[in-house]
Image (cartoon, rainbow, N blue to C red):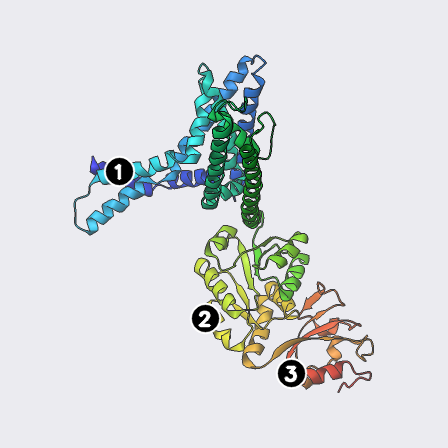
Amino acid sequence: MTNFIVKSAYRIEGSKTYHSFRTFLVNILLNHNTKHKKIFDILMIFLVISTVGILIYEVKNPLPPFIDHYEYFAIVIFILEWLCRVFVSFESHKQIIKDFEESQFLNMPYNIFSSIKIITNEKFKYILSLASIIDLLAILPSYRPLRILRIFLLFRLFKILRYSNSISQFARVFIEKKLELSILLLLYLLVIFFCSTILYIYEGTGLNEKVVSFSDALYWAFITVSTIGYGDITPISDAGRFTTLILIFTGYSVISFFTAIITSSISDKLDIIKESKAISNTSKLNNFTLVCGYGKAGTVLVTNLLNKGYEVLIIEPNANIVQSAELKNLNIIKNDASDISLLKDIGIINNVKSVVVLTDDDTINLSIILAVRSLNSEVPIISRCNRYETQDKLKLAGATKIIGINESSALVTLGFLKSPIAFEAIDEILIDYKGATMNEIEIYENSAFIGEKLSSVDFKKFNINFIGIVHGNDKSKFTFNPKTEDIVLKQKDFLIIIGYEKTIKDFKTYIQSKQSKRG
């Protein structure tokens, strides 16, 4: 029997059908980033709301026969869903394989019952969880003759929490803040008990005809502390009135503290919800460019990528920058780009065309490169290098190309994404000539080169290497490594060049001269 169970476990582990089926179930039940999950959630929410609507309708109206069939259909779906969740909650065969291989390694006899005990405990751990209990309570009312159970049908409304990721995120606030809320609730109940006891002792002896039992005092205390105050029970004694003041003060204090706790927690959850939505949107992108860092260089690069028809996702940890980008309807996530789980969620393994790392801290750039490379060894990574001495470290970490980037050279990054081979020349220049920098030279209105072809500019005289040209102030009109004889220079054009600081200064004087110094 043991051998049969172990062989079956290995057979299941090697079955493509099993893994495909389980992956399908996980995607529709648990993975909020898949299209199937969204469709499944919408259908389940419809079933929940429609069956609760039937409960409300039947209070004063007879139900047509087909309604019974519809509700039984919904119950079957709920039962199947619950069974599938139990199924995916724990992989039993893996526990059997794990225990069996451990026993073989330790040269000890394998005890199948120890594995069964662990599997049973794990399954019951899920069955007795709050989410599972809500599912079971939602199924119970299917037996119509037991009318008392019909009220449990309202528990189906709580199932909606499972199908809406945003709502479930808010619900988790109460779980995560259970310590603070528990202390607040304890204080709340102690004050109510204390004040209701005082009222009952002073006015429950016949002084107040409305306070006949301790439950009346409790009712008065709850109504008063909640600041509702129906007025059906009013204290008569001085002690009762003083107790009322205590309750009113306590009520406002509790409400204020409760509001502060929930508000701060929900504010934190909004970032998670936005991130989840952004990750979900990446499923709609196809071979997108991942940009890590949205400073000045990132802004220029992303603008040009979008204008060229590229699909872009941005990861930026600064909340203010993220908020500004969201106003532009950009796909942006507020998070750390070196987060392995985040990179997996956005599809770094098979859905990212290239990665551009543009933060102003080389340590952060290094960690991002290492994180990306740990998941994908093939994707091109272009990294900003802020200090020359860190260049080798970035390359060793796995960066495909290193650039000393600023607002102008961000355009060159776009050139590399479009034409990697042409970029090799730039790369060689930056490596071979230490100290070379990238800069932009504007053509002013008094320049003698206005109206001349770009080929008339003597770059070699100043040991300058020409990279590309920005046509006018619109930096989306960037031409990377154009044919110089085809370009006619105009006022407010920008030449993107590489050279030494001294030669660049002389070149600026040359290009802005009122009289041509060619030759």
Q: Where does the image place residue 215, in percent across and percent down from the top left?
A: 48, 26
Q: Amino acid at mark 1?
A: Lys
Mark 1 neighbour class, 10 Å CA radius: few under 14, some 14 to 19, many 20 or more:
few
* Residue under pointer 1: 117
- How far apart, in angstroms, are the residues tagged by discs 2 and 1? 49 Å
Residue sitting nearer the eye, 83 or 518: 83
Quadrant assignment for the N terminus: top left
- How far apart, in angstroms, are the residues tagged by discs 2 and 3? 28 Å
Identify the residue at horizontal 32%, vertical 39% (top origin): 92
Q: Where does the image place residue 446, in percent across and percent down from the top left?
A: 83, 78
Precedes in sequence: disc 3 or disc 1: 1
* Residue under pointer 3: 501
Mark 2 neighbour class, 10 Å CA radius: few under 14, some 14 to 19, many 20 or more:
few
Q: Nearer the viewer, mark 2 or mark 1?
A: 1
Q: Amino acid at mark 3?
A: Glu
| The image quarter in which residue 164 lies | top right
Mark seen at residue 249: none
Q: Where does the image place residue 324, in percent across and percent down from the top left?
A: 66, 56
Identify the residue at horizontal 50%, vertical 60% (top origin): 379
Precedes in sequence: disc 2 or disc 1: 1
**Mark 3 secondary-structure assignment:** helix
Asked whether, in this view, residue 117 is left or right of residue 62, the answer is left
